[in-house]
Amino acid sequence: MQKKLIALAVAGLVSGAAFAQSNVTIYGVMDATYDNVQANSATAGSGNNYNSRGRTTFNSSYIGFKGSESLGNGLTAVFQIETGIGEDPSGSFGSVGNKNYGWANRDTMIALAGGFGTIAFGNITGPTRLLGNVMDPNAGATGIGANTALLGKMGGGSGAGVFDQRLANAIAYISPTFNGFYGVVGYQPNESRSLDTSANSTDISAWTLGGVYSGGPILAGLTWTKAKDSDGHGGIAYNNNTVGTLALDDASDIRAAFRYDFGMATVGIMYDRMKATINAGNDAKQDVWYIPVTFKLGNGKIIGQYGWAQKVKVGGNDVDDTKAKHFEIGYEYNLSKRTMVKALWSQITNDAKASYDFLYGVSDSTTTSYGAGVKPGADPRGLSVGIRHSF
């Protein structure tokens, strides 16, 4: 994860010996777990609960290709293509139900790097998503314990929230690193703009920027992302079981994080605020906090985190019973430099109107895309054991 701090997902391409290479590197991760999950105590009664069930999940497993070419005069062309891999063989590089493993659906880009920094085009992990990933104590920031359980979901939902998805068809500038600090500016253009004559026309674009400092035992970051529908017809779809379907004219997210490495242990804190303007004229917002920790033990480490989502506010007023808490505890044991086994327990406690769910949700285990989540009041919980191998 530290490699990604250099510059978005370009890190492995524009650092060190990569400048001198013209060959293609194949790399990836296989991460499989057996999960036993459930979600009980729904506000509306037992008919809205999810009974205990087992499943096998390939948590953000992928294969990638990367390479570079030295162009002289300090310039380097770099590229990266990543594709997700699923647990259903017929779904790999294709679709099964809601699963979509389409080619190059992960970090995929072409970039030009030099003393001025890096300019990249493609499907890019923006600074807000990256900061959340870096602060997550789970290897690969994936699985039912990931902090995407609460981040940027405005009251509920399964999968990753809207600000923890990649920026498709985007352009980004990544500065050189100065004394441990680098900055990022990214833009997702309004290529989905519809006909101006349409009563429900959309003109959606997004900006993102952030800065990260990594030096010695300290990691600190601050990011901001904003998506806007300039036509004002609420084209930014947002829907969950807490606040229902909202037509948003714009949505923004501020994320700040700090982590200290004591050697044997790490402790961090992360703050996230999502705001949205509803086309009916009201503003909605919510604050989320996370405290991640790790502690080295034997040939592995104990991982844990505690997060809490505060009440959703609409029009300046609290929406009662919309809070939630997330607790995770686990252990990752290294069998080698590239292979680990792991076990963890993760649970979410939802208020009566909250509907938060895991990255691989109890309500929808087939995708990490944002979804409606469990029914209000239901409390997702699960035990996960598995193996992770990097190549």
Image (cartoon, rainbow, N blue to C red):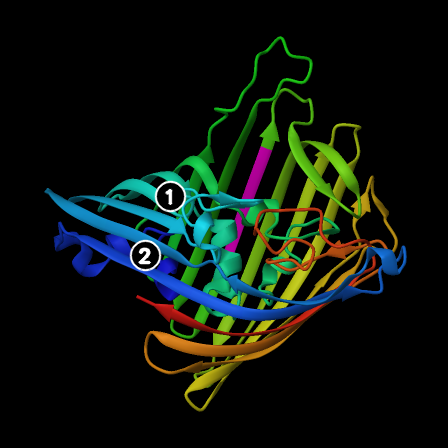
Q: Position of residue 378 (x, y in %)?
A: 80, 61
Q: Name the foreground residue: 227 vs 63.
A: 63
Which labelled disc corresponds to residue 22?
none
**Residue at image point 60% right, 58% down:** 360
Tell whether 193 sits left or right of 101.
right
Crowdedness of circle 1 by 10 Å Cα count: few (<14), some, many (20+)? Answer: many
Amino acid beneath label 2: Phe
Q: Position of residue 161 (x, y in %)?
A: 61, 49
Question: Can the viewer see residue 144?
Answer: yes
Residue span colored magenta: 222-227
Above or below, 230 relative to 342: above
Badge nearest the viewer, 2 or 1? 1
CA distance for labels 2 and 1: 32 Å
Helix, strand, or loop for circle 1?
loop
Which labelled disc corresponds to residue 178?
2
Specify the quadrant that holds the C terminus.
bottom left
Question: Residue 196 colored magenta?
Answer: no
Amino acid beneath label 1: Ala
Q: Earlier in the sequence, mark 2 or mark 1?
A: 1
Callout count: 2
Q: Position of residue 153 (x, y in %)?
A: 68, 50
Residue occupying the far front of the picture: 90
Above or below, 243 relative to 2: above
Give the prevailing secondary structure in the magenta stretch: strand
| Residue 337: quarter of image | bottom left
- Provide the residue designation for mark 1: 104
**Residue at image point 47% right, 40% down:** 167
Helix, strand, or loop for circle 2?
loop
Q: Position of residue 139 (x, y in %)?
A: 46, 69
**Residue at image point 61% right, 21% down:** 202
Specify the quadrant that holds the N terminus.
bottom left
